[in-house]
Image (cartoon, rainbow, N blue to C red):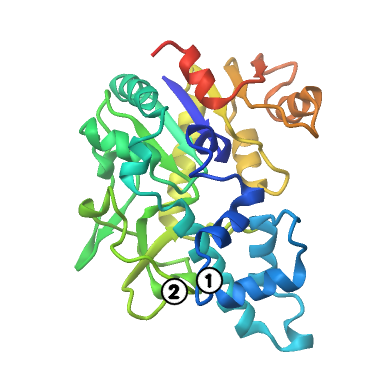
Amino acid sequence: MDTYILGAGFSYSFAQDLFPLTETLVRKGIEKFSHPKSYGALKGLISRMFDDSESINFERLATFLLNDPLKNIIGNSLTNYQIYLDLIGLVANVLNVDQALIKKSENYSLMQNWLSKLNGSGDTIITFNYDLILEQVLSELKWDPLAGYCMDFFMPGIDRIYPWVEPKANQLKYLKLHGSLNWQMEKDAFYDVSDKRIFFSLNDLSRPWQDSYQGYYKERYSYYPYIIPPLIGKKYENKSIQHLWHISQALLENSKRIFIIGYSLPESDVIAEFMLRDANISNKEIKIVRKIGKNESKTEVEDRFKGIFFSQTNNNRIELIDMDAMEFIGELGF
């Protein structure tokens, strides 16, 4: 069994005009929702704090808004929390791309061939992305999300849990460790995620909700997309999400090969790093596929991953491939 770990660079490679990277995600959202009444408070804060040409790191901004270290000084806690919800809503709307646009991507047929192979061999995908690129293809392959997601779900309107069952041997396991746009939560879950139910509707697989939400989450919506806030020091109290991380760790231990595609392993993502360190990954073939940026060196990127996967005793074989994600999948020959 092989395991593929995907980051934002994977989606960006699939269609960079639709799925921006972390550093440009907020700017792209403001451009997309340019109406004056859309996300007004968020736009006002960004205009006040950032230069027009400055990159805005989604994770850092969300951390500041939710933790709000200055709230006792300037009394803006409520305002900043509403702006935080605006930010999450903005990003969810940017990544909620219509199925027709995904199918128009020049890489769509490549994705079909790749996922068809993975689904047939029962491989695993672990992702830190929220988007639904893969779901669009998997739905055509008769993939069963209730088994393949490896998650316990509730169904909207039905007050009982549907526990996950072990996927069939020839079915892809698709683990979304930071949540997904087509998973849903009740409105109070933003305040306390520990015991909140995660909902999933089969009818929502290709379109997670009918209306676009402008501004922070409004009372008229019963459910909101379940995505783990992109914070430095992310919170994982939800028992279903904790279980998902344990499953991921076990699958990594039992994989023959591990492909890490489009994932930069940021220093702030401490939980992901220690999951990889704690997974007892030994005697593996590990390929890190990343397009090396202009302001980084291949040696630095390689050393970052070797610090996690390589020692004199675990016998891992590590290779860093300076290649675009879709280019690499094409090279696999599917």
Q: Quadrant of residue 21?
A: top right
The percent position of residue 88, horizontal first and vertical second, equals 52, 64
The percent position of residue 10, horizontal first and vertical second, equals 53, 34
Q: Nearer the viewer, residue 204 or 303?
A: 204
Lateral position of residue 98 relative to residue 37, left or right: left
- Asked if 87 appears above or below 12 in the picture, the reply is below
The percent position of residue 222, horizontal first and vertical second, equals 31, 73
- Asked if 100 appears above or below 63 in the picture, the reply is above
Determine the secondary structure under disc 2.
Answer: loop
Mark 1 or 2, nearer chain start: 1
Q: Nearer the viewer, residue 92 or 164?
A: 92
At a point 27% along the width and 23% down the height, the residue shown is: 170
Q: Quadrant of residue 46?
A: bottom right
Check residue 217 in the rendering and tell me which mark sits there, or answer none.
2
- Asked if 166 appears above or below 164 in the picture, the reply is above
Determine the secondary structure under disc 1.
Answer: helix
Residue at label 1? 85
The three-letter code of the residue at mark 2 reads Tyr
The three-letter code of the residue at mark 1 reads Leu
At a point 72% along the width and 53% down the height, the residue shown is: 55
At a point 28% along the width and 63% down the height, the residue shown is: 210
Which quarter of the figure is the C terminus placed in? top left
Q: Quadrant of residue 266?
A: top right
Q: Are marks 1 and 2 in contact (CB under 8 Å)?
A: yes
